[in-house]
Amino acid sequence: MTITATGAKRRVRSAQHPERGRSRWRRRDTWAAYGFISPWIIGFLVFTAGPMIASFVLSFTNYDGIGASHSVGFANYRHLFQDPAVAKSLMNTLIFAVMRVPLSMAVALLLAMLLLRVGRASGFFRTIFYLPVMTPSVAVGILFLLLFNGNVGLINHVLGLVGLHGPAWTTDSAWIKPGLVLTSLWSVGSTVIIYLAALKNVPKDLYEAAELDGVGRWNSFRHVTFPQISGTLFFTLIVNTIASLQTFTEAYTAFFGSSNSQTYSNDAALFYVVYLFQQAFQYTHMGYASALAWLLFLVVLVITVIQAKVSKRFVYYEGDER
Amino acid sequence: MAAPPRRTRRRTTALLSAFALLPVLAGCGGVSLTGGDPATFTTMGYGMGDALATDRIDTARAALPSLHIKVNEGAFDQQQFLSAVAAGDPPDVVHMDRSLIGGYAAQGALIPLTDCIKREHIDTGDYYRTAIDEGSLDGQVYALPDSFDSRLLLVNDKVLKSDGIDPATVSTSDWSRLKSLTKKLQHQQGGKLTRIGFDPKIPEFFPLWAKANGADLISADGRTAHLNDPRVVQALRYAVSLINVQGGWGKFKSLRDSFDTFGAKNQFARGQVGMYPMEDWYVNALAGLSPHLDLGTQTFKARDGKPLNWTSGYGWAIPKGSPHAAQACTFIKTMTATKTWVHAARAKAAQVRKGGTPYTGDVTGNAVADRIIEKDVWKPTGNAAYDKATRTLYSISRKGFIVPSNAAGTEFKNAWQNAINRVLSGEQTSQQALDQAQKEAQSALDLANQGRR
């Protein structure tokens, strides 16, 4: 009874002070919202922010995961500039990103535009294009070795049918990165789906207006489609660039994953994260690996900021005044 | 009491569910090797491939009746091992390549076996001296040998004869002749290499080539790298030239990668290779795969004409934090004991003979056991090729050299292997690559020996 009476009083008070009642509800809603997102917040603090802070601290030590660690000051960061493998792996990674990002975006856009035209069968092809994304990256790494084998691989066999003599993709330093870039197109399906959604959102009346003005296909793409999907293109540019700079699994599986593959490793496939992984988990130079991780973080940050700045000139968002 | 509004109830239930799920989801991350059972004894890196492996595990189980021995099969995984040790959840014993022992010992990831050897009265004289040395660091034993791989020269007699070459005249001591023989034996068709004349097996067998030229990759105490020693550079230049006369690394590796090494259509059966140095276990594999092969076996010879055998293999070690360190010692002793090996070899021989393929003997890491197996278990099969292979193997296994154990372990090995790969891929000359490797290896050795890690 007491509770009911208190509840009644509260309701009377709320009626007298509607603002206070609303703000209490708002506060409750806020707490509920925090409650719902707390799994993510806790996950972020425990699995992302925490390890980031820990790795920053470790980057100033010689921690090896087993014995005691000691502070080494900036020695790990100084070593980054003396270690030839850092420059090598960074350059490999940048070259890979420069080749992969535009190519994967162009192929994905082409496939998305084709999908737009296939009408009813679109769903079927969308599934077909997306299926390879489900393939584990480790399997893709193994496939790379099999398909691109210079002697008996399917790729060179097909090239041979049209009279081309394929290179030694898996052993020739000059062809390893192009081979891995081509392999990475295997998982272009997710970008295709994103582009398809963006293309479907381009207002049809814009194309009709362009057609009435006698604009050709290329100019219609250039002046209507491209600006309308530029926001999406920018998003995939950022995401693909970051993914390319962190590329690991396929190259690691093919060239470094087992003692046998490591015996025949090739420096052309030594990407930055592969080298970082080796330092951390093979040689247990956790302190140095942490410094490597922070350098990569800075590189990714700088590239992303540059892309964001440059994009302002090319990216159109609905509602923008240009 | 009035019930709370339905919306609030739903919200509260959802919130509680989210919190309840969180630890469940977060807990999905770790998997213990033991499963947390104190009566379970776990191994890492050991495979149960044949009777030699399973029979010995049965003997070890009998020696440790109070424990449930769980064999986590699969190749030794460095990352898994180090993570387990760092997390304080290591296996009880670990089976790994002896070339890694020094590095892990220097890091403190392994326990010295000094007390174990004393307590269990293990006679290290029973094992091959080089195998014990390879599993030691600074005079302390960290691993007992569990295998002993020798390198011998496998010759595809059929291929050589078809090219008019008498297999008996083949030798690795005359480098100039070997190169011209290699060139003669290799086949190319349509711009592709279709037969490897001679495979020098680099990078992995490079210590053999360096030794053949009178050099070691590292000093006997394992503290000074000799990677850019002029004789080492010369050996690399020569070994790479053997590949270059066959069309270069690209073609060579592509063909090698296409071999069906463990199939009936292996490179010997298909005539895809003339000859190459190889670990002795492959003779065993070939006996099962291609029992009627015209296989020739010879000793690898140094430039001075003397037989040369680079030996290596696996060893059993006890990781730091092993939950059953005392029992681990008993396990290691039992697994590598003379009696255990002989019993297992008899079981394997029976299994192989039952399958109708020649039993080519076993070389185990325990020298005393090997002499018994050679004398009592192995019998000439009547298959001349494999009988000769077994005799050659037993003869060369008595003497061999090792790459001395060192504190840099994997880093040292990677330094010289990566250097060779850079030369093979045309990125650097032999001198440049080995100069760089020398710097990397020495820096890793210095760091490891300072105890800074």
Image (spheres, rainbow, N blue to C red):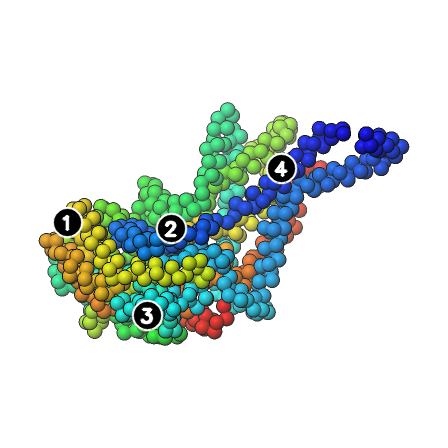
What residue would you read off at disc 3? B133
* Mark 1 or 4, nearer chain start: 4
What residue would you read off at disc 4? B17
SS class, disc 1? loop
What residue would you read off at disc 1? B292
* Mark 4 or 3, nearer chain start: 4
Question: Mark 4 against mark 3, which lies toward the viewer?
Answer: 4
Q: Position of residue B408 (x, y in %)?
A: 42, 68
SS class, disc 4? helix
- Give the residue type that dot 4 points to: Ser
Could you say which is closer to the camera, residue B346 or residue B100? B346
Q: Residues within 10 Å of mark 2 (few under 14, many from 20)?
A: some
- Give the residue type that dot 2 points to: His
Could you say which is closer to the camera, residue A258 or residue B206? A258
Alpha carbons under labels 2 and 3: distance apart: 32 Å
Task: Determine which quarter of the picture holds residue A78.
Answer: bottom right
Give the letter of the chain under mark 3: B
Q: Residues within 10 Å of mark 3 (few under 14, many from 20)?
A: many
* Mark 1 or 3, nearer chain start: 3
Marks 1 and 3: same chain? Answer: yes
* Mark 2 or 4, nearer chain start: 4
Quadrant showing the C terminus of chain A: top right
Q: Position of residue B417 (x, y in %)?
A: 37, 63
Question: Mark 1 against mark 2, which lies toward the viewer?
Answer: 2
SS class, disc 2? strand
